[in-house]
Image (cartoon, helix red, strand yellow):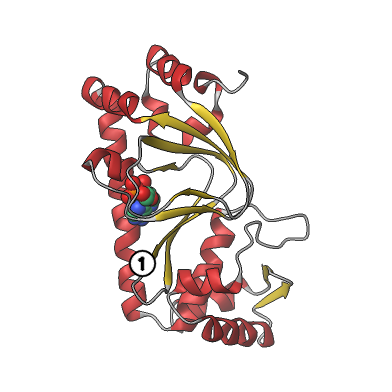
Amino acid sequence: MGNRCENCIVRQLNSLKVLKKEELKAISDHKVTRSIKKGESLFSEGEKLNGIFCVRSGVSKLSKISENGKGQIVKIASKGEMIGQRSIISEEQTNLSAVALDDMEVCFIPKNHLIDNISKNVEFTKALLKHMANDLKFADTVIVNMAQKTVKQRVAETISYLDDNFEKDKDGYIGVILTREDIANVVGTAKEACIRTLTSLKKDKIISTQGKRIKIEDEKALYNIIQGI
Ligand SMILES: Nc1ncnc2c1ncn2[C@@H]1O[C@@H]2COP(=O)(O)O[C@H]2[C@H]1O
């Protein structure tokens, strides 16, 4: 196997980076690397996981479907993200579904290895806590934005977030491609309202689009919209 955790650069992006060589080797001996095709599910909301997923490449949407069938995307997880640790630690079912937005490669780490290291390595436990505290802060911001910002501000903020967190393609478009419905589900609005807002941003030459691809044309104007100026 070429992709041993000891040699994997992705772990530098998450809590696994604080593990000692022996601890990493034990994980590496038991993890399973999987390819997930675009549109495939890693897990569904309410499932009981037997381990966590470490994203080696590709992106996944973490979302929740409400009773009226509307989806809300809480986060787009990319390289280095560990997905599923919340329910493993709380011994619950998953609170969100994870679906691949493009082809992904993930490593599945069995839960006993995670729990083992939590009990034995304080640095690892601290790193995990820090990570989950960040997830909580991120979720707080999402809630407050949803309640206090307009759809236009939220669409602008989502575009800016995607631009900041994902590489651009060779033509300068944001590298992660979301459907209009996915963008609406990040923003927390109807697809039609999302499309109308994108059209208005295009008309004002703040963004340009080609198919599903989006490019920021005027960063300052986008920033002003986010700030409500
Ligand atoms: N901001 C976030 N809020 C909730 N879960 C998140 C967040 N960011 C990442 N996640 C991960 O998404 C996972 C969904 O399944 P779990 O509830 O098991 O664990 C969750 C976390 O590991």
Horizontal and vertical percent position of residue 74: 40, 61
**121 or 203, which lies in front?**
121
Residue pointed to by mark 1: 142
Q: Farthest residue to the top: give it.
A: 22
Q: Is residue 84 above or below residue 142?
A: above
Q: Residue at x 54, y 42 (%)?
A: 79
Q: Is residue 148 above or below residue 109?
A: below
Horizontal and vertical percent position of residue 109: 42, 29
Q: Is residue 104 above or below residue 118?
A: below
Q: Farthest residue to the right: give it.
A: 171
**50 or 193, which lies in front?**
50
Whether the residue under disc 1 has CB within 8 Å of ligand 1: yes
Q: Is residue 114 left or right of residue 79?
A: left
Q: Is residue 58 left or right of residue 92?
A: right
Toward which corner of the image does residue 25 lie, by quadrant?
A: top left
Toward which corner of the image does residue 82 lie, by quadrant?
A: top left
Q: Residue at x 51, y 54 (%)?
A: 99
Quarter of the picture holding the N terminus:
top right
Label 1: state its secondary structure: helix
Q: Residue at x 23, y 19 (%)?
A: 120
Tell me which amino acid carries mark 1.
Val
Q: Residue at x 33, y 30 (%)?
A: 111
**123 or 95, which lies in front?**
95
